[in-house]
Amino acid sequence: MCIKFENNIPIHIQIINHIKILIITGIYKPGEKIPSVRDLALEYKVNPNTIQKSLSELENIKLIYTESTNGKYVTDNKSIINKYKNEYIKTLTNNYINKMKELNLNKDDINEILGGIKWN
Amino acid sequence: MCIKFENNIPIHIQIINHIKILIITGIYKPGEKIPSVRDLALEYKVNPNTIQKSLSELENIKLIYTESTNGKYVTDNKSIINKYKNEYIKTLTNNYINKMKELNLNKDDINEILGGIKWN
Amino acid sequence: MCIKFENNIPIHIQIINHIKILIITGIYKPGEKIPSVRDLALEYKVNPNTIQKSLSELENIKLIYTESTNGKYVTDNKSIINKYKNEYIKTLTNNYINKMKELNLNKDDINEILGGIKWN
Amino acid sequence: MCIKFENNIPIHIQIINHIKILIITGIYKPGEKIPSVRDLALEYKVNPNTIQKSLSELENIKLIYTESTNGKYVTDNKSIINKYKNEYIKTLTNNYINKMKELNLNKDDINEILGGIKWN
DNA sequence: GTGGTCTAGACCACA
DNA sequence: GTGGTCTAGACCACA
């Protein structure tokens, strides 16, 4: 696990986003138990309270749930995961396109650029 | 001028990249005088030495040149600017595609996503 | 270590040239560790930042490289060293010949002068 | 006239050498009047006393002479000029060869290098 | 201990 | 006013 925190963005937000991506990309799988607050605090090198705050928010948006004495789990409702995945895809894509527009590139330019990519 | 510096990346590198993008996007035009070292230091709220270091590097890679005692100017060699523009496009595109791949999306998925974008 | 700095030439440039010659002449050998920034600052009696600046430039031109936290080393790429050696030879020779020309000496004169030198 | 003074060498010595070279190279011709102390002081941007000291030394070694109320002249004794010219040639040549030796080059190497020079 | 960054601030040349 | 140099000194990451 490796995350570089940025200035100007609250750390708990950055942790939310990081874990969200782990779930969206399937690194944390649906229904899978996620590490304990204590362990995550060690991994991210932050205070356990910060982790707690982040996980609460992830629970609010239904990406994880708590089994009372047992730990926290990734939701197994794949449609929720997909919803956030699509949202993330949209954000990435818009960011990409906006930067391309700043460079005065249009739809055709982008298609040409993507056409030249080799996929493996 | 507005730039939020990130942790973990030296400020002078971030300034290099920021000014590079201003040149690439044509906000700083070919042959145009750029603000003085002192003015940039005020704008970016850093020490003039830090600006000096950044501009030296931009001069090394030929994106700007110095007219001694007169100021610094964006190169008017558009092919150099284009070289860095293309490099930047490549980086943006690769980053975008790599994130898409992490989400298990392939070429067709991306084309479909881009096809659904409305251009204005 | 002994170096007399000249006026009118920035010290960091003089240090670059001095170390370059140490490498070219093989006093600093290929692959050998060079003294730390702090030690060189003491030797040359300048600020460590000035050494840092000089060594950065020597790294830019690939004559040295950095092993992070470990120190800086002379390149072990002998062809790079040779390139700068040949460049230096050329400069010395041109300077010598130009001064001879100022004295109205020609090729034959120089050959005669050199022919009279005793080699040991 | 342009001379950059070096540290660590007394300025009057540097001026002596500079004028000596002007005479040796024939820029100041045998028998020619040299500029007044006052004018030389302006040219070299030094105190007239410094010029006076330098010219005295040049007079001691017979490269110039004074016509009492009339000014100072380059000697018209060409054999004296030649003596210093030869001395200067010797110094230049020895310096050149010593630097070449530091680079582990020998007589044959130098001949080869000089053979490759294009003369015009 | 190693390299590296950044600031504050003095000072320089050029014109 | 412009770029450029240099120092003193604090501070950082890495290990």
Image (spheres, coloured by chain):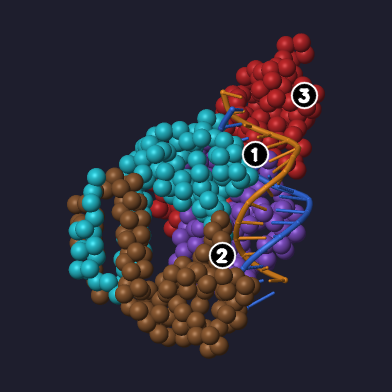
Chain colours: A brown, B cyan, C purple, D red, E orange, F blue
- In the rendered image, which residue does mark 2 sit on? A11
Q: Are marks 3 and 1 in contact (CB under 8 Å)?
A: no
Please state the total of marks drawn on the protein image.
3
- In the rendered image, which residue does mark 3 sit on? D47
Which numbered circle lies on residue C8? 1
Badge 2 amino acid: Ile
Mark yes or no: residue A48 visible.
Answer: yes
Residue found 40% across the figure and 80% down from its top: A75
Q: Position of residue B64 (x, y in %)?
A: 44, 41
Work out how far the residue at label 2 is from the one at label 1, CA to CA, in angstroms. Answer: 51 Å
Residue found 63% across the figure and 20% down from its top: D31
Work out how far the residue at label 3 is from the one at label 2, CA to CA, in angstroms. Answer: 67 Å
Q: Position of residue D102 (x, y in %)?
A: 60, 61
The residue carrying pointer 1 sits among few (fewer than 14), some (14 to 19) or many (20 or more) residues within 10 Å by Cα, namely few
Q: Position of residue A55 (x, y in %)?
A: 52, 74
Quarter of the image that includes the C terminus of chain C = bottom right
Instruction: Give the label, 2 or 1, closer to the camera.
Output: 2
Q: Is residue B17 above or below residue A83?
A: above
The answer for which chain carries disc 2 is: A
The answer for which chain carries disc 1 is: C
Q: Position of residue A52 (x, y in %)?
A: 57, 74
Badge 1 amino acid: Asn
Secondary element at tag 1: loop
Quarter of the image that includes the N terminus of chain C = bottom right
Q: Is residue C70 above or below residue B51?
A: below
Badge 3 amino acid: Asn
Instruction: Give the label, 3 or 2, closer to the camera.
Output: 2
Direction front: furthest residue: A68
The answer for which chain carries disc 3 is: D
